[in-house]
Every structure is written in structure tokens, then in C-alpha cells.
Amino acid sequence: MLPVKRLLPWTLALLPLGLLPSCKDDTLDPEGIWFISTEEDYKTKAQEALVNMEDYDTLHFRAGVFEFNTQLSVSNKTGIVIRGEGKDVTILDFAAQVSGAQGFLATDMVDIIFADLTVRDMAGDGIKVKDSDGVSFFRVAAVYTTPLTADNGAYGLYPVTSEDVLIDGCYVRGASDAGIYVGQSRQVHVRNCYVEECVAGIEVENCINADVYGNTATKNTGGILVFDLPSLPIIKNGNTTRVFDNDLINNTQGNFAPPGNAVANIPEGTGIMILAYDGCEVFNNRITGCNTLGIGVVSYKTLEVLDPGSSYDDPAYDPYVYNIHIHDNTFNRAPGYPFAGILGLTLQAVYTANGIAPDVVLDGSFNPDVPADDQKVCVYDNGGAQVANVDAINDFANVVANPTSADCTLSPLPETAIDAPLLPY
Amino acid sequence: MRLFCLTEWGQAPAIAAAILFTLLMVSACQDGRSPDGGFSLDSLPLEQLSDYQLFEGELNLLQPGPDLLPYDLNTPLFTDYAEKLRFLYVPEGEIINYQDEAVLDFPVGTMLFKNFFFYTDARDPSLGRKILETRVLARHQEGWKAYSYLWNEAQTEATYKVTGAVVPLEWISESGITRNIQYVIPNQVDCQNCHQIGAPLLPLGPKPRNLNRDFAYPEGNANQLEKWVEKGWLSGLPAVVPRMAAWDDPASGNLEDRARAYLDVNCAHCHRPEGDADNSGLFLNIENSDNSALGFCKPPVAAGAGSGGQAFDIVPGKPDSSILLYRMNSVALNVMMPEAGRTIIHEEGVNLIEAWITSLSPAGCP
């Protein structure tokens, strides 16, 4: 089936020969929009459209619940829009999935948009977009309705090795790793999203230039993670991420990530965690009831000490943190939280005396080959928040409250420019 | 480029029609062959498998005509124990150029036909078989394209389908077990996801080292590559051609050779530096000699439930602690590897990789 606009010249040419093909399809209109409704053979038609769509066409799911038993996939197209009529009314349900590790997989796209729909109960990840330039999600939900277990899919919205990525107004629930995960990508905005009951709410991993703002992460194990992990081949070391104007509320979910994954080390009760990253500015966030780690700044060296399973062999990877600014955040935390996980239990052991961990915890590791001025971690203007250097690398031998090393400032990071596609209608 | 579609070639209206078709680049012709036997690439994919007119007799006999040569691979991809019959078509007068490491440099117009079928009872092929799909890879001017054909229930014809399908299937295995599966025929995009090595689409199997083996032709046994030279299809065949081990034949290579062959064929279409799993950093292609990238003591990346609670992709000497084996040994969609192409566990493949990991000197991952 082809959009009508492209059939017309053929049709006219073939008329004299009496060879008119019977390809006309009523589900299409002349604007290159492929409408799919629950009242037709949508399983076939949706995937057929994804193969046959021309650049700048739209696949439009009408309202309703569409049950798919295989992964939907699209690749190598430009300007494609995949949309519904609202994330509460257009539901793509994958509960009966028999093949594919994602609900939706898009690869090698230029300017792809997902908008106004929900993907639900995938066997694995929700929507994965790989190796693409220009990726936008508007008001998309990825939901695992199942109980929170390691069997749930790892990532809800999952752009990876891509550039110009915008995730706006989205909702994720139930992912066993990160609800919204952006990996090894450049020029990223994650904004105005609501993520709950995942292990990590939002994770930016090995990315260069990202802004994460206006989001709410609640009831996850950890709210927002800015990580650099080893052994990733495309972007070895990320840099320059801003995390601002977010609400991190009661991220107290027990960690249900499958062991062996990096996020399995996140202690429940984490607001924001920065791991082995270069250049992160965290400001104007409201951190409420994330009682283990309000904000944690950790090198991968510390992770290796705490969890031997996280060792690696990757000479190009830099395990330290550099140029971290934490300022103008509001903390509202309380004592008495039951710590858990390797990091949590360790902090509990260190802070049994008063039962409350500091708002900002620095692991205190330090790259001996780099001047101190080039690896500042500055914490300031956080309304009386408590800071501690816990000397994790030396088995917490020398814990320092409100260390003078953190009493510094850094120039603000620049806004991240992105060129992500916007909706045509 | 030939673009003739109508069988009544001598008639003027047909010529006019053909010219008009050419001008309009119409691809709706159902008969892709010209009188001299050539193919119009613009007419691909043809609607039915029989339209290619490359098989003789009843289509389901898959009896190759004079323009097709059957071939086999030392180590094939596992796809739910499906049996496969592969055929090569090279346009008349065209030449395949030999390349050592990569897939052979096939000329424009080449087509590969791969037929997937199951014996009703694998212990007794005379009881019949069911052909499920025929995958066609065609070398166009701009690169390879993949087309999938679904066989009908009557086994008389296969029809082009871009969306793939899920087909309930029952058969009796070689060990006498009745198996029931939902056989998954991939959609066209999924074809690309495996066959896209870097930018272009490429065939996966026909590399010299995997083709370098004997085949029982009707006229007698012969080395496949030498046969292609004899047929005038292949040029530049060197005196010494690399040979991949047959994963299930200990005479063809030692345990390591066979395990690496198996991983190369079953995993490395994605797990290679140019492949779809490049973001994982796990490279299982046979050329890779970096043990860390091969998975030794390597933490998983984005594995999710696929980690199985283990810390490393491969722990030398310890198969039970190796994520790679765990994922081969699963059919959960968010765990199993490869992600596509199978719905059941390849027990013999698992046994091979388990034996290989067991044989590796313990490196003592932390």
C-alpha cells in the first residue's frame, strides 16, 4: 500500500493499458498520513506502514487499545512522525509479545517524532531509538503495569547513540533500570517529564551536553542519575550536563534492578547521583525525603571498592569526577530512613550517630594526575544544607563535615543547544 | 539495465507498454524476467516466489533451475532448528570478486535465496516437510535489499510480505520430541537490523571462510568456491582460502575454533564494532582478539534482566557465572540472545559455548 498522492501518476499512466492496479487504500489520505484504527487489521497495517512510509510521512494511531504480539520497527527514514491522539487514549499494548526485545525500535533515523501515545507492558524496553539524528518524544508514556520486579523491561524511553534528543512531557512507570535513559548521545533535553516507580527515574549516561529540567521523579529508587560508565565504545567519557528545576520526591522504592547492572548499586532514597562525570551543574532542584543520598558525587573508583563486580578494563575511561557545581538546591530530608544497598548500608554505618546522612555526600576520591583546580566539586548556596566528604576510597577513614574543598564556585555551564524535530500538526 | 515485463515480447503494444513502464519507473510488473533470462531489478520484489522462474517443477520441491546453484555454510545461524536450503543467482556475464575477510563482492543483480523449512519428523525426512519462508537478498545498484516470502498452507506458493508473521508450528525433533513453537518470520525492518553492517545492508553468510567447504552437487562433490570459479561466477580465488570451523564437527576445528565460529555467526551480526549492538562494547566477531571486548571479565552494558544477576559477560572457567551463556540459555524476550531469530534454546549451541568457557583458564575476575 502506498499513499494516494504517489499512486496518482501511475494510475493515470496505466489506465490506457487497462492495467490499473488495485492498490488504493482507504486508510490513507493525500497528505501522507497513515491512519491506523482498532477496527482493522492493525497489526499488519502498522508494520506495513512502517516499512512503506516515505520520508516526512506520519503514522497516526487513532484512539483505542492496539494489542501487538511482535516488536514494531522502523529504520532509515527521515521526518517520520509516530503519533496517537493522547497518551491516555491511544495505547499500544505489548502484553502478548512473542518476539522482539523492545516494544518499538527505530534505528538510523533522521528527525523522528513520537507523540501522544502510550506503550504498555513490553517484554523488554519500551521505545528504543538508536543511531539517529533528531529524536523527539512529546507526551509519550511507557508503562509497565506489572509489579515492580527485575523481570520488568529495563528502559521505558531509550534513545541511544543519537544526537539532538528531546524528551518532553513524558511519563514512565515501572522500568527495572531507568524510566528515561539517554545513553552515549549528544545535545539532549529531558524536560517536564514525570517518572515514578522505576529504579532510576531519569538517567543520562555517557552523554555530551544535556539539560535535564522541570521533571518530577518520585517513588523511584533514585531520582536523576548523571553517569559515565566504562567499556562503552561510542562515547567513552561524557561531559557537560545541567540538572535544574526538578522535583525529587520520596525516591524510596527498594532497588529492584537485576543484579549485575550498574543501577543495582543505587541505594533507595537517592535524589540525584553523579558518577564519574566531567562538568555537571545541579541547581534549583527541590529534594524532598530522599534520605539516603540527597545528592551524591561518586567516582567509579569508589564503586569498584564497594562492589568488586563493577571492575573494568578500559584504559580510555576516566573514572573520576570533575567540575561539579551544586548550588541553590532546596533540601527537605529527615532522619531514620532504613538504608539499603551497598552504598546505603555503608552510609548508615558511617552516620549511625545521628541517623541522618548529609544532604550532599562527596566520596572524596581524587585523580592524583590532575591539578586540584581542574577537579573541583563546589557546593554552595544550598540553604544550610549539610555537606560531607566521606573518604570512601579509604574505607571511610577520614570523614569530613562541610569540607573546605567544596567551598568554591565555578562558572555556570552553558545552555545545551539542540535541534530536535517539532510536530507538524 | 533491463526492464522488460511482458511475456509476449514480439508484439508492438507490449513494446509500447514496456517503454512506458521504463519511463515511469513502474515496478508493478509481475514477471521480472526478460526473454534472455535477465532480471529487472526495478521490478523487485516480485509478488510471488514463482515469478522469479528460477526453480524447476513444483515450486515446493525447491529444485534449482540452470541459473541457480545451491550452497551451504560451515557454520549457519541457529533459527529454531529450521532446516535451510540456500541458492545463489548471478546474472549472466557478471563476476563475483573475491574478498578474503568480508562478504564476497557480488555483482549488481545477484540474488540469494534462503528457504526455511521443518521436517514433519526430523528422524524421517520422507514423511514430508513444511516450508515457512524464503528470504531473498538482491544486490541492487545502490546496495542490497531484503525481501521476505511467506509460504501458503498448501505449500504451492510463497508471497512477498513486508510485515513478517507469527506462525504456529509443530514438528518432531531429531531426538523424537514433539515441539510446538510460535515461529517468527521477521519484518523487513528487522531484516535490516541484522543485515545492516555499518551503513549498507550486507549478506551475512557468504564469506569465503564460511563457504569454503564441499557440496554434494548432482554431478559429484566439489568445493563450493571452486565450483563457482568453474561456472565462471567467481574470480580472484587465491590458492589458500581461510576456512571457518563447522560448529558441530570436531574434525573441522578445536573447541575454541568451533565456539568462535558459532559466536561469530550467531552473535556478531550485531556484536561487532559496526553492528547494531556496538553500544554494548561486546564484540564477538571472529576477528576480535581483544579478550575484554570478547567479554572476559567485562561488565554488561544495558543488560537489564539479561544480567541474570551475574557481573561479567564471560568469566573464564565459569560458565554458570557468565552472562553470555545465561542469555543463550533463555527464551525470555528481555533476556535472550540473539534478540531475534529464535524462540527456543539451541541446546547443542549452549553446550558448545559452555564447554568452551569451562575450558578457558580462570582469569579470576574480581
Image: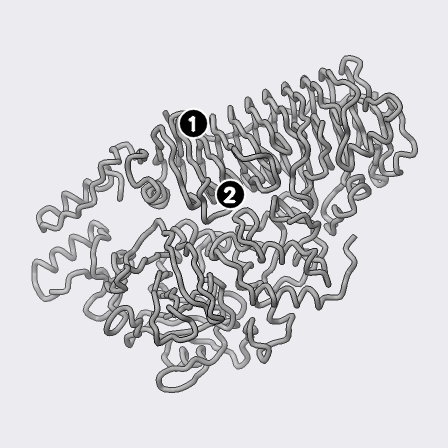
Residue A227 location in percent, x, y?
68, 36
A358 sits left or right of A117 in the view: right
Asked if residue A267 is positioned above or below residue B208 in the image, the reply reads above
Q: Quadrant of the N terminus of chain B?
A: bottom left
Q: Nearer the viewer, residue B8 or A230?
A: A230
Q: Are marks 1 and 2 on the same chain?
A: yes
Res A74 visible: no
Residue at 56% of width from left, 67% of height from top? B348
The x, y position of residue B264, in whole percent, is 56, 63
Question: Closer to the camera: disc 1 or disc 2?
Answer: 2
Above/below status of B44 relative to A81: below
Observer-nearest of A374 and B251: B251
At a point 46% along the width and 70% down the height, the residue shown is B176
Q: CA distance from mark 1 to mark 2?
A: 21 Å
- Colour setup of the view: one colour
Give the amino acid type for the residue marked by disc 1 in the picture.
Asp
In which quarter of the view is residue A351 placed? Answer: top right
- Residue visible at 51% across and 38% down? A126
Image position of B238 with respect to A142: above or below: below
Q: Amino acid at mark 2?
A: Ala
Residue A181 is situated, as x and y percent measured from the top left of the image, at: 59, 35
Would you say A333 lies left or right of B344 here? right
**In front here: A410 or A122?**
A122
* Front-most of residues A296 and A154: A154
User: What secondary structure is found at the residue carrying circle 1?
Assistant: loop
- Disc 2 marks which residue? A123
Q: Is residue B102 above or below residue B27?
A: below
Sequence-first disc among 1 and 2? 1
Neighbourhood count class around disc 2 (C-alpha, 10 Å): few under 14, some 14–19, many 20 upward? many
Q: Which residue is mark 1?
A: A116
- In what element is the residue under mark 2? loop
